[in-house]
């Protein structure tokens, strides 16, 4: 499956899809994994409580956001692949972040959770047929394809990896 065209996803997500260098979806998941692993290993525990500015998330908070968002994007992809006819509600990332306490978790624990989620994400997208990847569903009342959800997932992580490298490390 190759990069989707803009009519297959909300315009807001163009910023994420543009960050994915691969044209082929599963190659994107394969290439991104070692980059994620290296970045996670580069963060010492004491740095994980760092926020780069007042009112910004700590690295632990950011990692929890990435985990939550990946799970939500996978749920959307699964619903769309299974021909769900109902609109999937949006989510408020700031409300989600305010509802979780990350200080009681270690960076190693959050990293392990994200890697497990990513493994499940990759297996999910591998399980979709070519036809399923082209299916459309609706989230926030905007039509989106299954394949688009995969590219958005990859791009969301690239987006936050760049922020981590530039502002946290």
Image (spheres, rainbow, N blue to C red):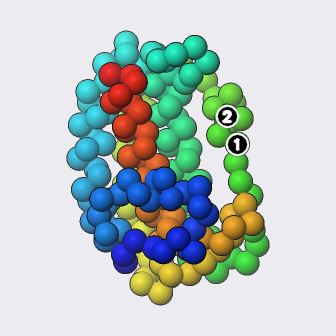
Residue visible at 56% across and 81% down in the picture:
135
Whether residue 69 is situated above or below residue 127 in the rendered picture:
above
Relative image position of residue 38 (x, y in whole percent): 23, 37
Residue visible at 50% across and 68% down in the picture:
148
Whether residue 124 is situated above or below residue 64 in the rendered picture:
below
Q: Is residue 120 visible?
A: no
Q: Look at the numbered disc 1 and give the secondary structure of its residue.
A: loop
Snapshot quadrant of residue 161:
top left
Using the image as rendered, state which of residue 162 and residue 107 is in the foreground. 162
The image's mark for residue 94 is 2
Residue visible at 48% across and 26% down in the picture:
60
CA gap between label 1 and label 2 equals 5 Å
Q: Is residue 45 visible?
A: yes
Whether residue 2 is situated above or below residue 121 in the rendered picture:
below
Relative image position of residue 37 (x, y in whole percent): 27, 40
Tag 1 near tag 2, CB within 8 Å: yes
The residue indicated by pointer 1 is 92
Query: Where, quadrant-wise, is the C terminus in this rendering?
Result: top left
The reply, left or right, for residue 75 in relation to residue 133 is right
Snapshot quadrant of residue 10:
bottom right
Whether residue 141 is situated above or below residue 113 in the rendered picture:
below
Mark 2 neighbour density, 10 Å: few (under 14) some (14–19) many (20 or more): few
């Amino acid at each position: 499956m190759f990069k989707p065209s803009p009519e297959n996803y909300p315009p807001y997500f163009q910023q994420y899809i543009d960050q994915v260098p691969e044209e082929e979806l599963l190659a994107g998941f394969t290439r991104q994994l070692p980059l994620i692993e290296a970045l996670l290993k580069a963060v010492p525990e004491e740095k994980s409580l760092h926020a780069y500015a007042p009112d910004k998330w700590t690295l632990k908070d950011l990692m929890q956001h990435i985990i939550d968002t990946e799970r939500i994007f996978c749920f959307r992809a699964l619903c769309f692949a299974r021909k769900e006819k109902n609109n999937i509600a949006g989510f408020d990332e700031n409300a989600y972040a305010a509802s979780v306490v990350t200080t009681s978790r270690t960076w190693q624990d959050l990293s392990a959770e994200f890697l497990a989620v990513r493994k499940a994400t990759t297996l999910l997208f591998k399980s979709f047929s070519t036809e399923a990847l082209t299916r459309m569903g609706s989230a926030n009342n905007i039509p989106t394809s299954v394949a688009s959800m995969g590219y958005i997932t990859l791009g969301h992580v690239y987006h936050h990896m760049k922020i981590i490298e530039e502002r946290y490390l």
